[in-house]
Amino acid sequence: MELDYEKLGFKCGVEIHQELNTKKLFCSCESSMKEEKKTFEIRRQLRSVAGETGEVDTASHYEELRERVFVYSGYENEACLVETDSEPPHPVDKEALEICLGFAKALHMKVPDTLCVMRKTVTDGSACSGFQRTILAGIESKDSFLPKSKVKVNQLNLEEDACKIMKKEDNVVYYSLSRLGIPLLEIGTTADIKDPEHAKEAAAEIGSILRSFNVKRGIGTIRQDVNVSIKGGARIEVKGWQDLKTIPLLVENEVLRQIALLEIKKELEKRGLKKFDNNIANATNAFEKTDNKIISKIIRSNGRVLAILLPKFAGLLKKEVCPGKTFGRELSEYAKAYGTKGMIHTDEDLKKYGLEKEFDKIKKQMKAGKDDLVIIIAENENIAKKAAESVYERALYCLTGVPEETRIPNHKDATSSYARPLPGAHRLYPETDIPMVQITQKIMDSIKVPEMMADKIARLGKLYKIDAVTLKEMQRDGIDIEDYAKKYKKIEPKYIAQVLIEYPKEIKKRYNIDVDAEKYADELFTRLSAGEINKDAVLEIFAELGKGNKVDYSKFAVMDEKALEKEIKIMIQQNKDAPVNAMMGIVMGRLRGKAPGKTIAEIIKRLMS
């Protein structure tokens, strides 16, 4: 399906969240997340209360209704009383603040004269206290555009990262406190991204700029939130996407989803549906003699089966909202959000559940017509009631169109699932335990902006004759080629890059072994610089180290040319009838690593000519 994004009224902005490689933002705990020694565990539940305006945040109220329990684990040197909200936060980490101000300066953003630490209500349990601290550190200026993609960066926040989820068991969620409090830059763009590929380009450009600073690297250290809407639709925030390459597919699928939801709205209008009441009924009696094991087990455990009648909805739950996902599956996510296993409805093949007779009874009970749809939800009464209410409210919203909400991504197919309502603006309030931070011109003048990644790659490529692809890989892996070049002046930087980037790939291909090149690099480069080994031996030594073997470096000791020629003469005499190419193989088999291959080849050709 070819989409005309301009005609669709497409709007998109991205938010990039990047962890900084410093101490935690409001305490001196480490941010390494080794999680080696567990020191404590606490359990909490969160409750929603009205703020200063007298309003209760929608997302906060939703989480309270779910009645979940949160269990937090603290690890040695990685969590303290600050993370558990048992001690006031310490002053803002100086290094993290300087990195943040440096990023603002690099993108020509305006930095407020006074930075105020704010609390942001977070009630999904990912913040132990029920809030995260965030600082607005940069706002847009007329020049705060990304140089290549021309997308404007309009907001920069310095904030705490959230807890790391460990597992879920029924209504209990287990978190680690090790990630909570790690400094995070949140970079937001305006909604003027033109299409899905443009979204990828903007996110990639922000990522490239970030790698010029002291940031963490690896999976999970950088995450993208994508905000998408179309004309007639609504702003949807898909949180926590990690695969840059497939951002276009994620964005396209959300556009297709909104188009499909608007089509459902039009179809209901065509069917003459303008409103419908909350028609939820207790249908447990219809399942007293059911053969369905799952439902009978729920009833035996004092559970209930609730039925929902959706007038004129027949056939709509079969509609595909994006590739591989029907509206029925979409609607079931609202039931699952309250702890159910899902729902069953009359747009499905009821034979596979063995529930044809039961649904016939329910249809009669609810006076369902041929154009009506019936849904059942089976769970304990409290959960079933909340889930049924949620499904009804979402179905009712089909008459309006697309609801604003926060969604979580499905990384397998780049679709998304309902997470919670979109938070309101009133979830922010000042942090009273930390004084405001004054930003003077003197402070801004002292902030140094590092060399940008693109400029650095161009400079190093010209200086060391290393291709841009290799240099990008080195930057991605945090390998400082300049440091190696200064340290090992006798070794060509181009060869150093080859050893650190290409050799591990070759060893993986040949032996299926993963080798941490930097772990052994200093030892090998030191021996290479001292002339104890030669280049031809490095790959083999790497492989031995990767296998966990202790290397006998005497096997790879460099032979001088006289000793080498003497050894080769003996081998030629022992293999008088061997042609030059065969002789080359014989000699290399015995002397590989003891001298450069080029030198060995020259001696053989000279002696056999």
Image (spheres, rainbow, N blue to C red):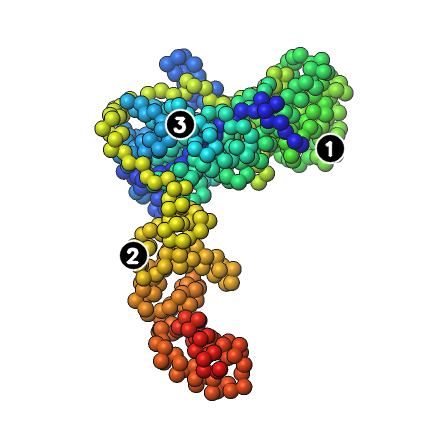
What residue would you read off at disc 3? 144
Q: Are marks 2 and 1 in contact (CB under 8 Å)?
A: no
Determine whether label 2 and label 3 are within 8 Å by CB. Answer: no
User: 377 or 236: which is nearer to us?
Assistant: 236
400 lies left or right of 143: right
Dot 2 alpha-carbon crowd within 10 angstroms: few under 14, some 14 to 19, many 20 or more: few
Is residue 506 shown above or below 165? below
Q: Are marks 3 and 1 in contact (CB under 8 Å)?
A: no
Q: Secondary structure at mark 1?
A: loop
Label 2 or label 1, whichever lies nearer to me, is 2
Of residue 597 and residue 306, the one placed in the foreground of this image is: 597
Q: CA distance from mark 2 to mark 1?
A: 70 Å
Check disc 1 and report the residue beneath it: 349
Q: Residue lying furthest right in this view? A: 370
Quarter of the rendering containing residue 258: top right
Which residue is the extreme one toward the left?
A: 442
Q: Amino acid at mark 2?
A: Lys
At a point 66% along the width and 19% down the height, the residue shown is 265
Residue 491's mark? none
Q: Nearer the viewer, residue 428 or 533?
A: 533
- Element type where label 2 sits in the image: helix
Task: Mark 3 vs mark 1: give the one in front.
Answer: 3
**Does the rendering let one see residue 549?**
no
Q: Position of residue 129 (x, y in %)?
A: 36, 28
Identity of the amino acid at label 3?
Answer: Ser
User: What is the distance, in whole Å, between disc 2 and disc 3 at their CAs?
Assistant: 38 Å
Residue 335 picture location, percent across and down? 58, 27
Which of pointers 3 and 1 lies earlier in the amino acid sequence?
3
| Residue 482 image point, x, y percent | 33, 51
> Residue 487's mark?
2
